[in-house]
Amino acid sequence: MKARVHITLKSGVLDPQGKAIAQALGNLGFGDVHGVRQGKYIELELADTDREAAAERVESMCQKLLANTVIENYRIDLDD
Amino acid sequence: MKARVHITLKSGVLDPQGKAIAQALGNLGFGDVHGVRQGKYIELELADTDREAAAERVESMCQKLLANTVIENYRIDLDD
């Protein structure tokens, strides 16, 4: 089973990488970009075949390692 | 209009970040994770209202700045 995890900064948390991208895009002539936020995208290949068990395990991985829940949100999508 | 860009390493390209995550997950007791690939996820807020024009501009941004097309693939999703 494949899990796709999106990790994004919570709104209100400063995103210097996003700001740098926005500025670089402006310099390249893409001035109409109002906001850029950069996050992480992680693909996990799991041995689990049970969907519920897999969801629970990936949730636990996010809490313990993948995301810093003080400043980041995460979203988990599971593919069969 | 909002654009969501996923940037992932092409298959075959070494992903040391992914390997480090897989190892850390193993140390935390998540031994059943077979493979981890880490990519980037970028959200862009665009002034464009025309979907086709926006898609073209974001495609151009990916080619010029956001992705290294030698080693990375990108996928663009547009929300209204």
Image (cartoon, coloured by chain):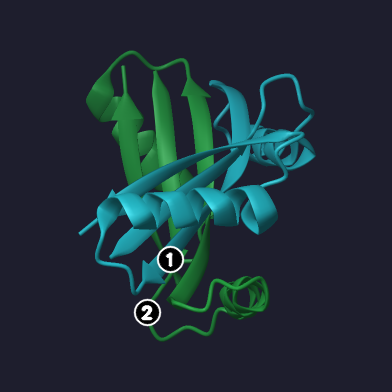
Chain colours: A green, B cyan
Foreground pick, A21 / A71: A21
Q: Answer above or below: position of B67 versus A77.
A: below
Q: Is residue B49 left or right of residue A48?
A: left
Q: What is the x, y in percent for residue B58?
A: 48, 55
Which residue: 20% across, 59% down? B80
Q: Amino acid at mark 1?
A: Leu
Q: Look at mark 1 in the image and give the residue it sits on.
A: B44
Within the image, what quadrant is residue A54 found in? top left
Residue A11 is tagged as 2
The chain ID associated with circle 1 is: B
Q: Amino acid at mark 2?
A: Ser
Q: What is the x, y in percent for residue A70?
A: 46, 75
Cα separation between marks 1 and 2: 14 Å
Within the image, what quadrant is residue B3 found in? bottom left
**Local secondary structure at mark 2:** loop
From the image, state whether disc 1 or disc 2 is nearer to you. 1
